[in-house]
Amino acid sequence: MTIPEFQQHKRDKKKLIVVTAYDALFTRIVEQAGIGAILVGDSLGVVVQGKSNTLSVTMDDMLYHTKLVAGAAQRALVIGDMPFMSYQASTEEAVRNAGRFLQAGAHAVKLEGGRIMADRVEAMVSVGIPVMGHLGMTPQSLHRYGGYKVQGKGKEQAKALLADAKALESGGAFAIVLEAIPVPLAKTITDTLSIPTIGIGAGPHCDGQVLVLYDLLGLFDDFVPKFVKPYAHLKADALQALRRYKEEVEQGKFPGDAESYH
């Protein structure tokens, strides 16, 4: 999957499928499933590192996991998620850090923010770095929103998000993630833009969808956002396997003859 192929999906009215991945094993599984785009998300701060949000994720964290994914990916478009304060301080720092993602093997980067980040997007694109935008509920701004809340409900807020989307498109973004916004607003933005929209909690009218891999596999059951549909229940399977292993070791059933060398 290349950037032009990614964008062609919108023109062909073919849905884009994106999932997160953070390591080589899951990257291979994602590709075997025929999924063409992988986001190395800063969500790893929550699902891998166990933090309550993504704000403590560093560039070193992201580059390490990007190298793992990029090294294993054979066909997928790999998008590196720029962590908090890797692009906000200045355009120069944003371009430099985005370049580090490409050096780590990513094909593109993603950043959060609308009109205020349009100059960053334009600067990156001008030096050959493809950029995906991210609007709506942007997790790096959770303290400003007072938590994880749906954005764009009011008329003025909806107008602002549409203006943000247009600004990112004008800046050269090749696609935009729309997170936790009302269905009608997501449809309006999708219909207005010539670049693809990728929804997460933004309804069915986006040009594609993205989910956190650990969420769709059912590895978490303590908190499941409304927009997540678990397609498996791997936590339950893992618990059952580990309890059986513990029991068989305690009872002397494992290792047995089949698992021993003679």
Image (cartoon, rainbow, N blue to C red):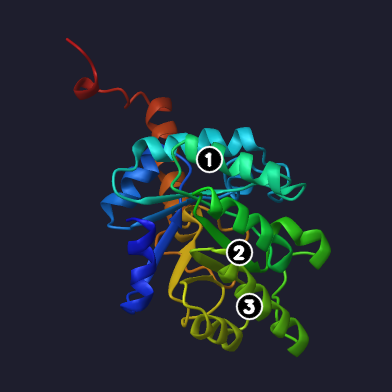
* Position of residue 82 in the picture relative to residue 238 (left or right): right
| Residue 51 visible in the picture | no
Indicate which disc, 1 or 2, sits on the residue closer to the N terminus.
Answer: 1
Determine whether label 3 and label 2 are within 8 Å by CB.
Answer: no
Q: Is residue 132 above or below residue 96?
A: below
Residue at coordinates 58% horizontally, 70% vertically from top-left?
170
Q: How far across and down, in percent of the image, does residue 177 sit?
A: 55, 66
Characterize the local packing of mark 1: few (<14), some (14-19) or many (20 or more) Cα atoms within 10 angstroms. Answer: many
Residue at coordinates 71% horizontally, 85% vertically from top-left?
159
Q: Distance between the residues labelled 1 and 2?
A: 17 Å
Q: Name the residue under label 3.
A: 181
Q: How far across and down, in percent of the image, does residue 117 sit?
A: 69, 60
Quarter occupied by the C terminus? top left
Three-letter code for the amino acid on which mark 1 is drawn: Phe
In front here: 5 or 223? 5
* Position of residue 136 in the picture relative to residue 33 (left or right): right
Characterize the local packing of mark 3: few (<14), some (14-19) or many (20 or more) Cα atoms within 10 angstroms. Answer: many
| Image-quadrant location for residue 35 | bottom left
Kind of element beneath mark 3: loop
Indicate which disc, 3 or 2, sits on the residue closer to the N terminus.
Answer: 2
Closer mark to the observer between disc 3 and disc 2? 2
Q: Which residue lies furthest to the left in this view?
A: 262
Kind of element beneath mark 2: strand
The circle drawn on residue 101 is 1
Three-letter code for the amino acid on which mark 3 is drawn: Ile
Q: How far across and down, in percent of the image, does residue 43 sit?
A: 60, 51
Q: Distance between the residues labelled 3 and 1?
A: 28 Å
The circle drawn on residue 178 is none
